[in-house]
C-alpha cells in the first residue's frame, strides 16, 4: 500500500511539474496597510495612494489580473464610483483588478446589511462582478447559532456581516477563476464546487496581520496550500502583510513576497480545466473508509457474540 501511494504520488508530481494550460500574467499587491487605517475614513486617500502606487509598478509586466487583499479598502466600491479614478491608464484595457472591500445591501425594512466581498473591476475601475463571502469566520464576522440563541437580538445588531448565497466565478482574458476570502480557503468542501463549476485557477485574499508572528500565520497558509493540490490549480494568495504567494498545482510555493512590507509579486500561471478525482467525487473515499471500518467493527462484534 505504501509503495502504491508513493508511486502514484511521484507520478502525479512529475505530471504536474509543467502544467500545459494557457499562460496568464498575474500581479499580487501587498499594501502593508496599518490596521488602524482601515477604521479611519481620513486615512482612505493615503491607503488608496499606496495601493495605486504599488499597482503602477506592475505596468511593465502588463498583467492580465492584479489582486489586492481582503478589505483593501474600507468602503463599498459600488457606492463610491470615483474611488478608482486613479486606476485609469495603469492597466491594459483587457486587464482586471480584484479588490477586497465591504458591500452594503439595503433590505426591504431599510436595514443595511454588510457583506465581506471581492469586487472584480475593469481597467477603468468600474465593477464588473462581485462575490460575497459564503462562510463567515465565527465570532469575527458571525455569531454561532448556540450563542445567538442565548443572547437573542444582540447577535443580529445592525452592521454585522451576512453570508453570500452564490458560488460566483470571475473571468479574465477568457478564463474563469474563483475567489475565496480569508478562512474560506481552509474548507475543501467549499472550494470544490467552484472548481467543479469551471474555475481554472484559484485566488485567496486575506488579511492575517492580526496574527503577528504567531504560528497560526503559517498554519493558515499551510492549510490553504492543500486547495491547490486537491484541484490541481494554481492558487494566488494576496494578503495585506503576509503570507502573499503564488502556489503551483503541486502545492509548491513558486513565488513569495517578504512579510510586513509593501510589495508587488508577479508571476505567470497556467489556466487548467482538468477535473481531478477529488473534484469529481469529493470526500466519498473518506466516507467509504469510515463505512468500511464500521462494517468490520460490527461484524467482529457479531462473531464475538
Image (cartoon, rainbow, N blue to C red):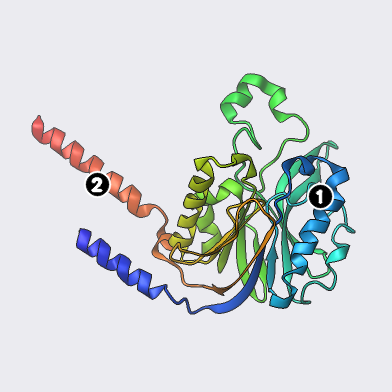
Q: Nearer the viewer, residue 28 or 141?
A: 28
Q: Nearer the viewer, residue 255 or 22?
A: 255
Please tell me whether mark 2 sits on a helix, a strand or a loop. helix
Asked whether residue 274 appears in the rendered view, the answer is: yes
Q: x, y (%) of residue 138?
A: 59, 35
Disc 1 from disc 2: Cα separation: 50 Å
Q: x, y (%) of residue 210?
A: 63, 40
- Residue at the farthest left position: 304
Residue position for label 1: 76
Asked whether, in this view, residue 2 is left or right of residue 142, the answer is left
Residue 292: image tag: 2
Q: Quadrant of the N terminus?
A: bottom left
Q: Nearer the viewer, residue 123 or 294?
A: 123
How crowded pointer 2 is (Cα within 10 Å; few <14, some 14-19, many 20+) is rated as few
Please tell me whether mark 1 sits on a helix, a strand or a loop. loop
Q: Nearer the viewer, residue 278 or 90?
A: 90
Q: Quadrant of the C terminus?
A: top left
Q: x, y (%) of residue 275?
A: 46, 68
- Residue at the farthest right position: 82
Q: Quadrant of residue 16?
A: bottom left
- Residue at the farthest top position: 150
Nearest to N terminus: mark 1 or mark 2:
1
Q: Quadrant of residue 161?
A: top right
Q: x, y (%) of residue 122?
A: 78, 68
Asked whether, in this view, residue 189 is left or right of residue 241, the answer is left
Are the residues flagged by discs 1 and 2 in contact, CB closer than 8 Å? no
Residue drawn at the location 79% of the way across and 63% of the way down: 53
Q: Quadrant of residue 87?
A: bottom right
Residue drawn at the location 51% of the way across and 53% of the way down: 224
Amino acid at each position: 500500500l505504501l509503495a502504491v501511494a508513493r508511486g502514484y504520488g511521484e507520478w502525479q508530481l512529475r505530471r504536474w511539474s509543467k502544467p500545459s494550460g494557457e499562460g496568464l500574467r498575474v500581479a499580487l499587491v501587498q499594501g502593508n496597510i496599518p490596521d488602524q487605517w482601515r477604521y479611519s475614513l481620513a486615512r482612505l486617500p493615503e491607503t488608496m495612494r499606496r495601493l495605486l502606487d504599488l499597482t503602477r509598478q506592475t505596468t511593465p509586466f502588463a498583467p492580465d489580473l492584479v489582486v489586492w487583499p481582503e478589505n483593501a479598502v474600507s468602503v463599498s466600491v459600488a457606492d463610491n464610483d470615483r474611488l478608482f479614478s486613479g486606476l485609469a491608464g495603469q492597466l491594459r484595457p483587457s486587464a482586471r483588478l480584484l479588490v477586497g472591500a465591504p458591500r452594503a445591501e439595503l433590505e426591504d425594512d431599510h436595514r443595511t446589511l454588510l457583506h465581506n466581498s471581492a469586487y472584480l473591476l475593469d481597467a477603468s475601475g468600474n465593477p464588473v462582478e462581485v462575490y460575497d463571502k459564503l462562510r463567515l469566520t465565527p465570532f469575527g464576522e458571525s455569531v454561532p447559532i448556540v450563542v445567538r440563541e442565548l443572547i437573542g437580538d444582540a447577535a443580529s445588531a445592525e452592521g454585522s456581516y451576512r453570508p453570500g448565497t452564490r458560488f460566483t466565478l470571475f473571468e479574465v482574458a477568457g478564463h474563469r477563476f474563483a475567489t475565496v476570502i480569508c478562512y474560506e480557503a481552509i474548507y475543501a468542501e467549499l472550494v470544490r464546487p467552484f472548481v467543479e463549476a469551471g474555475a481554472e485557477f484559484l485566488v485567496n485574499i486575506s488579511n492575517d496581520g492580526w496574527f503577528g508572528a504567531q504560528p497560526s500565520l503559517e498554519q493558515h497558509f499551510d492549510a490553504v496550500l492543500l486547495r491547490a493540490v486537491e484541484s490541481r490549480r494554481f492558487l494566488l494568495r494576496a494578503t495585506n502583510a503576509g503570507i502573499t504567494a503564488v502556489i503551483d498545482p503541486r502545492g509548491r510555493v513558486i513565488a513569495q513576497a517578504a512579510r510586513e512590507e509593501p510589495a508587488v509579486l508577479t508571476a505567470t500561471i497556467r489556466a487548467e480545466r482538468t477535473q481531478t478525482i477529488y473534484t469529481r467525487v469529493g470526500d466519498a473515499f473518506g466516507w467509504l473508509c469510515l463505512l468500511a471500518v464500521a462494517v468490520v467493527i460490527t461484524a467482529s462484534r457479531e462473531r464475538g457474540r
